[in-house]
Structure formats: C-alpha cells, structure tokens
Amino acid sequence: MARSKSRPLSPHLTIWKWGPHMAISILHRVTGNGLATAGALGLVWWLMAAASGPDAYATFVACATHPLGYLVMIGLSWFFFQHMTSGLRHFVLDMGAGYELATNKRWSLIVPVISTALTIAFWLFIFGKTV
Amino acid sequence: MGNGTGIGRVRGLGSAKHGAHHWLAQRYTAVGNLLLVLWLLFSLVSLPGLDHESVVTWVAQPLVAVPLMLMIVSIFWHLRLGMQVMLEDYVHDKGLAFLSILLLNFYAIGGAAAGIFAIAKIAFMGAAD
C-alpha cells in the first residue's frame, strides 16, 4: 500500500495495555483459520474415506486413533468450542451490548473457561463410552 | 451519504461495493455452523460406533445426508469469508493478494464439492464401493 513515510501512523497496537479481550480477539482468528484449514480438510477426508470404502476408511481410522490423531482431534475440538463461544460473544457485541469495560473484560475471561469446560466434557463423554 | 436508514447508508459501499453483505453472510453462516456442527457432534457421540458400517448407514439416511450437505456449504462459505478477511489484513502485495484469493476460492469451492460428492455417493449408493 502506498503511504507517505513523512506522515505518522496512528499508534494502535503498541500503546495499549494488554487485556483479555485482545487475546480472545486474536484467538478467534487463530482458531477460525485452524478450523478452516485442518478442521475442514479433516472433515472432508473423513467423508471421502467413508465414501471410498472400508479400506480407505480403515486408513483414516488408523490415523485418527493414533496418539497424534487424538492430539489433533482434541485440539480441533477445543478450537471449535473456543471459536463457537467467542463467536457467540461477537453476536452480543454485534447487538451493541457488552462494551462496558468491566463487562467486556469479564466475558473475555469467561469465554475460554466455557470452551475448555465444553472440550473436557465432550472428551470425558467419548472416553467414558468406550471404556 | 443521505440521511436515510442505517442499511441505506452502507448498501453498495466498501471496497467491493457490496456494503454489509460480506459481514451479514458471515453471521448467517455462523448461525448455520452453530446449529449444524453441534448437531454433527451430538450425532457422532450418540452413534453406536464410528466404524465404516455404522457411519455409512447413518450418512445414507435422507434426514442426515441433507443437513450434512447444508453443513458443508455453511462451513466452506463461512471459512471463505473469514479467510478472505485474514488474507486482506496480512497479504499487502497486490499480485499475491489476488493469487491468495484465487487459491482460497479454489479451496473453498473444491472442498465443498468434495464433501458434498462424498455424502451424495454414500446416500445414493449405500455401502457399495
């Protein structure tokens, strides 16, 4: 982008004290793009493997149930729940609510707690069923 | 800039002259993802098993195949819009920005086509391979 070097940019990222809302905002982008790449590709791989037949499906299951596969799936599930709860927070902000400093900080701190709790509950349920 | 309604003031504006359409479509597909992905997760953990036979039998049902296809459309539409914003923020070179959006469109439409084809094949052909 063409910009005159003699004109200063308004300082924005450098002058603010870090707050939880900034971390949640960046996490929303990180989790969204992680789901958009690894998550979507994994989902299509699963569907394609199921459509291709038992052999292709067995290859998918072997990869998914490898310890690294579980690590990726648990990571993606946390990415999903984090992106979901953070997205629900965005819906509230879109309506013009929740911008008061204390409220905004409180919900920014609660969002990752909810997403982590949902992830733990999800996997406890899965492992509880298989054991 | 008239004194009209809020929607009237943003319609047709922005760098792509599409006003708030991108922003709204991101929200519509977010609601679609919220409902459909939660449905998928609940369904997967409620299935008797995740072996090939169980999954194919489940996907082949019309009331599963159709929402699955809708979920694929919603997911890939949403990720196309979201990744576009990410690329617009970080890719500053005009040629690279053009190329990255081109590849993003290939990825989003190609990925959605692959997902829908897989669901359709299972739905129409069952476990046959």
Image (spheres, grey):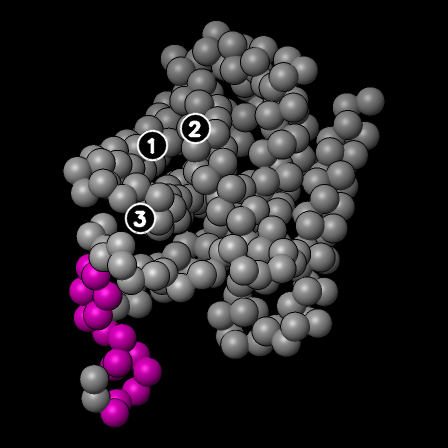
Pointer 3 indicates a residue of which chain?
A: B
Disc 3 designates what residue? B88
Q: Position of residue B107 (x, y in %)?
A: 30, 33
Find out whether residue B59 is within the magenta segment. no
Query: Is residue B98 visible in this depiction of the protein?
Result: no
Q: Position of residue B75 (x, y in %)?
A: 42, 44
Of the pair B73 and B103, the residue shown nearer to us: B103
Position of the N terminus of chain B, as image quadrant, is bottom left
Q: Amino acid at mark 3?
A: Glu
Disc 1 designates what residue? B111
Image marks 3 and 1: residues in contact by CB distance under 8 Å: no
Image marks 2 and 1: residues in contact by CB distance under 8 Å: yes
Q: Amino acid at mark 1?
A: Gly
Q: Give the distance between the C-alpha atoms of the residues marked 2 and 3, in whole angstroms.
A: 22 Å
Instruction: Indicate left or right for A106 with A5 as reference.
Output: right
Q: Give the distance between the C-alpha atoms of the residues marked 3 and 1, in whole angstroms.
A: 21 Å
Residue shown at 61% from the left, 28% from the top: A73
Res A70 quadrant in image: top right
Residue shown at 43% from the left, 28% from the top: A41
Disc 2 designates what residue? A41
Task: In the rendered view, tell whether residue B51 sits above or below residue A89.
Answer: above
